[in-house]
Image (tube, helix red, strand yellow):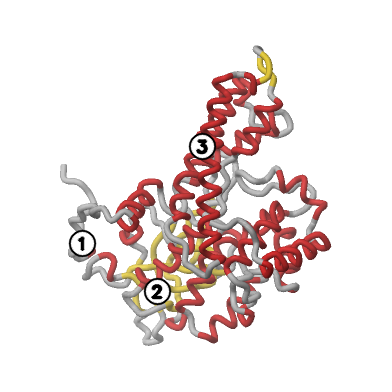
Amino acid sequence: MNFDDTPEEAAFRATARAWLDANAPKDLEAELKMSGFGGMTLKSVDPMAASKAWQAKKQAAGWACLHWPKEYGGRGATPIERVIWGQEEGVFGVLSGTFTIGHGMCGPTLMAWATEEQKRELLPPMASGEHIWCQLFSEPAGGSDLAGLRTRAEKATDGSGDWIINGQKIWTSGAQHSDYGILITRTDSDVPKHKGLTMFFLSMKSPGVEIRPIKQANGQSGFNEVYFTDVRIPDAQRLGAVGNGWQVSLTTLMNERLSIGSGMPTGFPELFDYCMNLQTEDGPAIDDRSVRSRLATYAVRASGLKYTGMRAISALSRGETPGPENSIGKLVAGASMQELAMFALDLQGQAGVVSDPAQAEAGARFQAMLMRSPATRVEGGTDEILRNIIAERVLGLPGDIRVDKDVAFKDIPTRGRG
């Protein structure tokens, strides 16, 4: 690994830093620093308006979706320049969270599978933040088995060539704010489950689309249920061939794990600062050997994540494709966040039950972290799914036994015998 910038990378970093110094919304910096867990909470301005304004400003100056081609609204930058920009943007990158799914997952899928005309029409307003996109994948009955989905797409009987969609999706992040979404459906139940899927994109304002926000434990509604009742989608909005939806979805899933895994916080810096300033009945918390031991464990883990990420950055700098580092990063970071938050609340004692930022210790930072952390271990692949990926695709271990591999989807049992 080489942690030093090349001369070209150093010049790019200096240019990015100068632009950010002149243009970043520094009046929001203090609030953004407290919005790293559980979603962005801005009280001085409307969060969505602030996010869209910052994204539009970046896009106008050529700093949005850096790795995208210029004709699609990007900068045509190298992968390592994209990493450098993320490092320099720092806390202001929180404002871009609304667009993560579009920029990191939907955009790359469209680039790989949409027509050239569709790319030029849809990608620039996605890059600028004018249009927000969501990913319509998970379903209530499927769990982590995406290929077990039951949302149906059937050809319209009027000869138009359109598709009629009926079914339900769940855990759809940002659906209530989205203008468009990519949607995976089942078009053939007479073949094994992975072979009968087809992918589309659609307007979230289409007749028959109903969005119901899910109230989370932290009081927010980042996730949604989405229902489709006779929703009509033109065949021109199909991505890939009929029945090839699984291959299209792999493009999305690969980019999803890269987007989530490469930037997930653990909360260690916040915990360390808290322990350095916390006074307990026995004196400063940092003087307690058990506290120092726990901090040392977390420090080693955070360091491992940092340098594993550096390995991926070094690979990008050399023009290589990183290996499984981002799946490992998500697996470790998600569990660490939950563990660190629980330890911080243990240190707070009974005061840990207070979740009002105006009254709680450390501005309820660790309460928000604990409430958000279970979702980090589910979104983008559960811990169990990621372990299977690492075991099978990295370590070369035998795959799980699948009795439904060559069975038509319609013949797979859906309930136990009793």
Secondary element under disc 3, as helix, strand or loop, is helix
Residue of label 2: 164
Which residue is pictured at 21% across the width and 70% down the height?
Answer: 190
Task: Tell me residue 196's x, y (percent).
Answer: 29, 70
Secondary element under disc 2, as helix, strand or loop, is strand
Of the image marks 1 and 2, the number of the one nearer the N terminus: 2
Q: Residues within 10 Å of mark 3 (few under 14, many from 20)?
A: many
Marking on residue 405: 1
**Relative to 398, is 279 on the left or the right?**
right
Say which of marks 1 and 2 sits in front. Answer: 1
Residue type at mark 2 is: Ile
Residue of label 3: 338
Residue 192 makes an appearance in the image: yes
Secondary element under disc 1, as helix, strand or loop, is loop
**Quadrant of the snapshot with the C terminus:** top left
**Relative to 14, is 261 on the left or the right?**
left
Q: Quadrant of residue 244?
A: bottom left
Q: Residues within 10 Å of mark 2 (few under 14, many from 20)?
A: some
Q: Nearer the viewer, residue 208 or 296?
A: 296
